[in-house]
Amino acid sequence: MKLKKSLGQHFLSSPSILEFEATLANPKGKDVLEIGPGDGRLTQFLLKKSPKSLTAVEMDPVWASHLEERFAGTPNFKVIEGDFLELESSDAQLIVGNIPYYISSPILFKIAKMKAKTAILIVQLEFAKRMAAEPKSSNYGRLSVTSQLLFEVKLIKKIKKGSFNPPPRVDSALILLRRKDFEMEPKLEEFIRAIFSHKNQNIKNALSHAGIGVPEELPKKRARELSKEEILEIYNSIKVSLPG
């Protein structure tokens, strides 16, 4: 079957990496949700690890039908044909997926609002580096702060582009996310966006550019120099004066 570039379909073709991913996920006895399973090559490795249930969410009707046929008679398996981003609810304890790069951020924030405490994902390497980046590093930015407020982020393994069929243009990475008990307020999200829109300016100037009036006593540091804890502390000290 022909893969659709419009849906970001690049299937992992290395059995050793698929086995590694399934082992890392450790789905035994858990309700598992797989994002974008495609032809089921990761699915088969997950099912061998004895999950309590495995729900595969696949938006391509051709692959959804293929999955239903391939795993017909598997009692703990079901397919949902549809967009993961539009999934209303899920009782899954674990989320696994080799996700389309072009919608990685929306998927990340969708996962943050679900019940699952753990996610094992394959994403673009640069995206993974930005998620896990430390303050003052070149990759540190808005994605780093928001990701690390919502999750414990671990970059587990780099995956060469040749491990996929067809090969994408860039390398990938396997990441482990453990969700924190933290709710991202819309005002905080806007605050983080504002200070990183001009990350080479100090945060007072960056907020001024965003049309946000702030106290004179704000630290004269740039956003990229601040840890997530410092950013949260500053936000909490001025949030009553922020719009919204």
Image (spheres, helix red, strand yellow):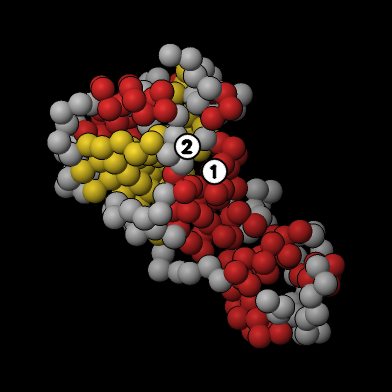
Q: Residues within 10 Å of mark 1 (few under 14, many from 20)?
A: some
Q: Mark 2 vs mark 1: which is more N-terminal?
A: 2
Marks 2,1: beta carbons within 8 A: yes
Q: 7 and 174: which one is in front? A: 7
- Measured from the top left, where is residue 74 in percent x and y? 17, 31
Q: Which mark is residue 104?
A: 1
Residue shown at 48% from the left, 53% from the top? 110
Q: 214 and 130: which one is in front? A: 214
**Relative horizontal placement of residue 173, taking residue 126 as reference (left or right):** left
| Rendered image quadrant of residue 113 | bottom left
Residue type at the position of mark 1? Ser
Residue shown at 49% from the left, 24% from the top? 10
Up the image or down, 229 lies above or below 79; here it is below
Local secondary structure at mark 2: loop
Local secondary structure at mark 1: helix
Q: Which mark is residue 76?
A: none
Specify the farthest residue to the top.
1
| Distance between mark 2 and mark 1 Cα atoms | 7 Å
Residue shown at 69% from the left, 62% from the top? 193
Quarter of the figure that contains the C terminus: bottom right
Residue 63 can be seen, yes or no: yes
- Measured from the top left, where is residue 29 in percent x and y? 16, 47
